[in-house]
Amino acid sequence: MITPISDADRAWIASLLDELAERNVPLELPALERYYDAMQRDWAGRPAGQRWDPTQFVARVGAGFGAVLARRTGLDWYVVTADGKDSLALSGGRADFVVYPLAVVAKRWRAGQTGFLVALGEEFDEEARRFLARADARADGRAGA
C-alpha cells in the first residue's frame, strides 16, 4: 500500500535537509557522496567503543539522496507499507515503482560501502525515467482507445 506522507514526515525530511545545509553539504550527488564517504571512514576508523551513533547521519544522507532523486525525476515522498512495516520512499504515486533512499543508504552504511551515491543515483534516475515513460505511453494508449 502506498499513501502520501504526513506533515510530520515532511517536516522531519525538511529538518534532515536543513542539517545538511548547516554542514554546508549541497543537495548534489557528488557532495553527498564526499560527505558520506568521509564520515564512513571516520566512523570505521574508530575503535568500536568510540564510534558515534550513525542513525541520524544515515537518515540525513538518505533524505538528501531522496531529495536529489525527487528533484531529478519528479518522484515524490510516500509511505509504503509492505509486510506490516511502513517505510518512507519515493514514487510516482504507484506501488509499481518505488525507491527507498533512506533504506538504500542504511544498507550500504551497515556494509561499510563507500563511493556508491553518484552511480546509484544515476542508475535510479535512468530507471525512473524509463518506468515513467512506459507508464505515460500506457496511459496515452488507453486515452486513445
Image (cartoon, rainbow, N blue to C red):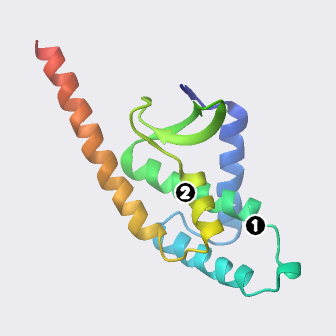
Whether 133 is drawn above or below 36: the answer is above
Residue 54, image x and y in percent?
A: 75, 66
Q: CA distance from mark 1 to mark 2?
A: 14 Å
Q: Is residue 6 left or right of residue 30?
A: right
**Quadrant showing the C terminus:** top left
Q: Amino acid at mark 1?
A: Pro
Q: Is residue 13 left or right of residue 126?
A: right
Q: Is residue 2 left or right of residue 118?
A: right
Q: Quadrant of residue 16?
A: bottom right
Whether 31 is drawn above or below 90: the answer is below
Whether 34 is drawn above or below 61: the answer is below
Residue marked by disc 2: 104
Residue drawn at (66%, 47%) of the image: 13
Residue marked by disc 1: 54
Residue ranking furthest to the right: 49
Residue 78, image x and y in percent?
A: 55, 34
Residue 20, image x and y in percent?
A: 66, 64
Graded by Cα atoms within 10 Å as few (under 14), some (14 to 19) or many (20 or more), the crowding at tag 2 reads some
Give yes or no for contact between labels 1 and 2 (Cβ–Cβ under 8 Å): no
Q: Tell me the SS state at disc 1.
A: loop
Viewer-nearest residue: 119 or 27: 119
Residue drawn at (23%, 39%) of the image: 133
Q: Quadrant of residue 93?
A: top left
Q: Amino acid at mark 2?
A: Val
Residue drawn at (60%, 53%) of the image: 102
Graded by Cα atoms within 10 Å as few (under 14), some (14 to 19) or many (20 or more), the crowding at tag 1 reads some
Residue ranking furthest to the front: 83
Viewer-nearest residue: 108 or 135: 108
